[in-house]
Image: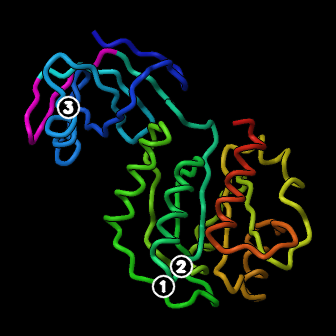
Amino acid sequence: MEKVILSRNPHLNFMQIFFASRLDEHQLSLSGQEAKHAVQVLRHKVGDQLMCIDGKGTAFEATVTQAGKQAVVLDILHTFTGWGEKSSSLQLAVSPLRLKDRFEWMIEKAVELGVNEITPIICDHTIKFFKYKHQRLEQIILSATKQAKRSFLPILQEAIPIQEYLSTQVDETSVKIIAHCQAKAALSTYQTEIQASPTMQIMIGPEGDFSEAEIQETVAAGFQEVSLGENRLRTETAGVYVLSAIKYMQGY
């Protein structure tokens, strides 16, 4: 019988975490590369206990009952809701980069630092960026999710123009922040709001920064302007800086 545990930080000593699909109330399955890695690489067999996540905010301690190269079936022993997740949702809108490695690195670190949704936004100063493969970035996100011991798989949206992104930001309860080089207020100015809000939306521009028109449009959409200090940061550095600062402010 499955035991449900409402805990964000169960003391489980599992080095490997697997992405699983739920078959029913009592069983999970691993397929594709997850099954292959479990059986062919790590040599797991019937009776072994594995740590799994469903990508929707739940983790499971489960026992292998069928161990095939194409599919692994497990019985659920314990369920942990909200495992590895914050109580608030963090959304990052960031300009895609010209260099693939830098953009992939930023996506990986953003996931490790707790982001829930990533939207690449095309800005006036966004230079020609590489045509990233959505499937590859999703694999990077999955690996980073497991590495960080999270149970929610962050969502990667398709790249859209900044104006289209702004037109969808209507949540009045969210803390909305745009970081740019001309801003005066420090991020810490909004620490109280950041600690209390259930949702945060952060915008990071391209290496040429947001244009003046974009800043005006963003402020009109309810975003607060913040500075990340006197030094000029690369886009990927700025993204990691903001997410790290927010994580610190929230006490994580």
Residue of label 2: 97
Give the position of the N terminus as an image quadrant.
Answer: top left
The kind of residue tagged 3 is Leu
Tell me the element at label 3: loop
Residue 41's spot in the image, x, y percent?
19, 39
User: Going by the image, does 78 lie left or right of 159?
Assistant: left
Residue 19 is covered by the magenta coloring: no
Q: Please tell me which residue is depicted at 78% across the width and 41% down the height of the picture.
A: 195
- The first of marks 2 and 1 along the sequence is 2
- In the image, residue 37 sits, relative to residue 125, either above or below, namely above
The correct choice, above or below, for 47 with respect to 119 in the image is above
Instruction: Check disc 3 and report the residue beneath it.
Output: 23
Count residues near mark 1 (Cα–Cα under 10 Å), then give few for <14, some for 14-19, many for 20+.
some
Residue at image point 67% right, 68% down: 203
Q: Which residues are magenta?
A: 66-77
Circle 1 sits in a helix, a strand or a loop, which is it? loop
Mark 2 Cα shell of 10 Å, populated few (<14), some (14-19), many (≥20): many
**Magenta includes 71?**
yes
Camera-side mark, 2 or 3? 2
Q: Are marks 2 and 1 in contact (CB under 8 Å)?
A: yes
Q: Position of residue 123 (x, y in %)?
A: 61, 84
Location of residue 202 (image quadrant): bottom right
Label 1 and label 3: CA atoms lie apart by 40 Å
Horizontally, is 220 left or right of 20 in the view?
right
Mark 3: give few (<14), some (14-19) or many (20+) Cα within 10 Å: few
Could you say whether the residue bearing mark 2 is in a helix, strand or loop? loop
Residue at image position (45%, 76%) is: 100
The outermost residue toward the top is 1
Q: Nearer the N terminus, badge 1 or badge 3?
A: 3
What residue does disc 1 label?
129
What coloring was used for the rendering? rainbow
Q: Amino acid at mark 2?
A: Leu
